[in-house]
Image: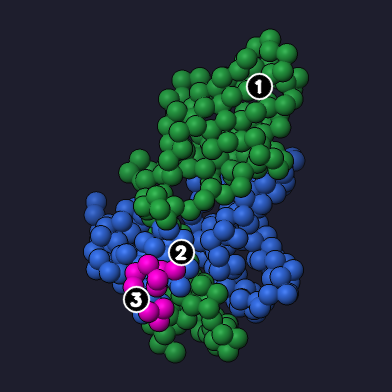
Chain colours: A blue, B green
Amino acid sequence: MAEVVCRMNAEEIARELLARRLDLTAYLRSLVCNRDDAEDLFQDLCVKAVARAVEFQSAEHLRRWFFAAGRNAAIDAGRQAQRHPLVLSEAAVAALAADEPERPAIGWRERLHALRRCLETLTPRAREIVQLRYGAGLDGRAVSHRSGRSLDAVYKTLARSYQYLRECIRRREALDNRLP
Amino acid sequence: MTNHAFLDLCARVFDGKASRDDLRRWNERLVNDPAQRRLYRDLCGHLVLIEEELVGTQHPETARPPRPVVMARSLAAAAAVLVAAWAWWGNRTPAASPVSSDKAVATAEDSAAAPPSAFIYPFDGFPHLEAQAAPGDPDPELRVVALDEVDPRIVTIAQRLAGSGPGDEFDL
């Protein structure tokens, strides 16, 4: 008897990719180090995935294809940008892509909620710098100018804020997981 | 290298301010230290969340310019655009603060691809999206108006999912 193979259609693929947009964009961002490049790459891969719809047998199959295609695209982009100093080496991209991405314990809506609560607990000075750097998209020098702090102090504040937010979100995730 | 020093270096790298020597050290950490590689991946995940939360809530003086978008070239493509946009909308958290956009307009050039009614159908009953077509118009224009706030990045993705090409007629 012939085996029946299920295939995803274009709409199922679009829904799956859009539902996982933040997780997939985070993965791509780790490979290209840049928000806009990661979003462009996400869009390109979405288009390619929909175009190859008949090949995907499951959401997991699609996910694995996406990670492999993202790694290849990031390496290609690095090679094409040879006039500029490469940020991530090919070895680093390969190492990052080789790690199986962790499946978050809670969904992105819950993580976003946790982040929102954690951002509220940053000191006003740190929050201002995070807002200027990642909300307004200013570079470090512009943040330094606008906030009246040295460039070095801006980077140190960002590093401290990352560490704080990471721990804060983890605590909140652990707390949410304990709730019924 | 401590985690704090590594994160400080990440901030400089993301800003394009790391020296060649710093970049080399940074790459070495990513290749050879699984713990800092994980820290970096966490950082990237959190930055995506931070931007999702903060972009669009900043003061207008520092608002980011809109990113380039593409246009839908056929009725069928435009329909797929908004089906995908609707799929996204259904997954969006109501408490988030999306980028404000009063209106999204798609102009379809290929009126022969499908009758306007075929396009309107996917939005029937959806509160946030509305299709406006002009049946019998000799130069048909299809206007799709988003009645609520829509994140333009998602509309851009949806357009590209629909197979549309580059252009400037999709006005967010």
Residue at 42 percent of width and 56 percent of height? B62
> Which label lies toward us, 1 or 2?
2
Q: Which residues are magenta?
A: A142-152
| Residue at (40, 81) in percent of width and height | A152
Is the C-beta separation of discs 2 and 3 under 8 Å?
no
> Can residue A7 be seen here?
no
Q: Residue at x 34, y 69 (%)?
A: A147
- CA gap, disc 1 to disc 2? 39 Å
Given contact means CB atoms under 8 Å apart, are the residues at marks 1 and 2 in contact?
A: no
- In the rendered view of the protein, which quadrant contains the N terminus of chain A? top right
Q: Do the residues marked 1 and 2 share a common chain?
A: no
Q: What is the magenta segment's predominant secondary structure?
A: helix
Q: Quadrant of residue B169?
A: top right
Question: Could you tell me if residue B119 is visible in this image?
Answer: yes
Determine if marks 3 and 1 fall on one subunit: no
The residue that disc 2 covers is A138
Separation of residues labelled 3 and 1 (CA atoms):
52 Å
- The residue that mark 1 highlights is B141
Q: Position of residue A171 (x, y in %)?
A: 27, 66
Relative to B105, is A116 above or below? below
Residue highlighted by disc 3: A149
Instruction: Residue B141 in the image: state x and y as whole percent.
Output: 66, 22
